[in-house]
Amino acid sequence: MTADTPASVTNRQRRGTSTTDIALIAIFGALIAVCAVSAALPIGVNGVPVTLQLFAVFLAGAVLGPWRGFLAVLLYVVAGAAGLPIFAGGAAGLAPFSGPTGGYLLAFPFAALLTGLAVSSVRSRRGPVALPVAIVVGGLLGEALTWIVGGTGIALYADAPWWTTVRAAFAYVPADLVKLAAATVVAVAVHRAFPALSGRR
């Protein structure tokens, strides 16, 4: 029986980490799908429904960090584009990308990325305030991006004036801020329970 070498131990750790990363990305991709399908309300600006998608997007970035969070949301978007009925209202395929929701779908991965980058910037800081503040700041940047890109998508779809449409899309922002607050509370609790989940120590 031979002893494990440092290289073999490191390789096993890397394989275990990669497996864990893939599982977490898949889990959060599924969470976004559930939030999109089960919580859709057929109301909004120019046919864009109100869902809990953005709650799960914020949560993915805040819990998984920037790149795993980005990949989790990207997995959701790609799976829906490939034909799984996981977009709002059970929609699927490429049609939603040319409709009023197209801009939002394109912005979601980057909203998770911005939230995760803000969280990763405070990994070495301690204290009860740094993490929730980082999630809120990153989430607000992600929300601004989602609002502008989503509103632009509506303007292109409706062939309407850009600023008028983007300003009208601001109607979604108050509800999105509630989702961000909820995601912050959940993410902070997850970080406290599993401090190594996103690389925080």
Image: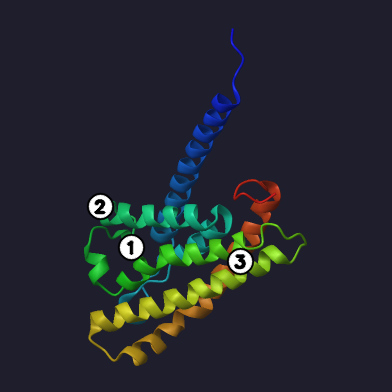
Q: Which mark is residue 74?
A: none
The disc at residue 89 is 1
Classify residue 13 as left or right of residue 73. Answer: right
* Residue tagged 2: 82
Q: Position of residue 182 (x, y in %)?
A: 60, 65
Q: Residue at x 49, y 74 (%)?
A: 143
> Residue under circle 3?
135
Horizontal side of 115 relative to 96 (left or right) equals right
Counting from the top left corner in percent of width and height, residue 135 is at 61, 66
Label 3, label 1: how many angstroms apart (C-alpha)? 28 Å
Q: How many marks?
A: 3
Amino acid type of the residue that numbered disc 1 sits on in the rendered structure? Gly
Q: Is the residue 11 above or below the residue 109 in the image?
A: above
Residue sitting at x 68%, y 48%: 195
Residue at the extreme right: 127
Say which residue appears at 43% left-offset and 49% top-offset: 30
> Which SS class for mark 3?
helix
Quadrant position of the N terminus in the picture: top right
**Amino acid of disc 3:** Ile
* Secondary element at image label 2: loop
Q: CA separation, marks 1 and 2? A: 16 Å
Q: Earlier in the sequence, mark 1 or mark 2?
A: 2
Q: Quadrant of residue 189?
A: bottom right
**The quadrant where residue 96 appears:** bottom left
Residues at marks 3 and 1 touching, judged by CB atoms closer than 8 Å: no
Secondary element under disc 1, as helix, strand or loop, is: helix
Residue 153 placement (x, y as % from top left)? 30, 77
Residue 171 visible from this viewpoint: yes
Q: CA distance from mark 3 to mark 2?
A: 31 Å
Q: How is the image coloured?
A: rainbow
Residue 34 at least partly seen: no
Crowd band around label 2 with a 10 angstrom C-alpha radius: few (<14), some (14–19), many (20+): few
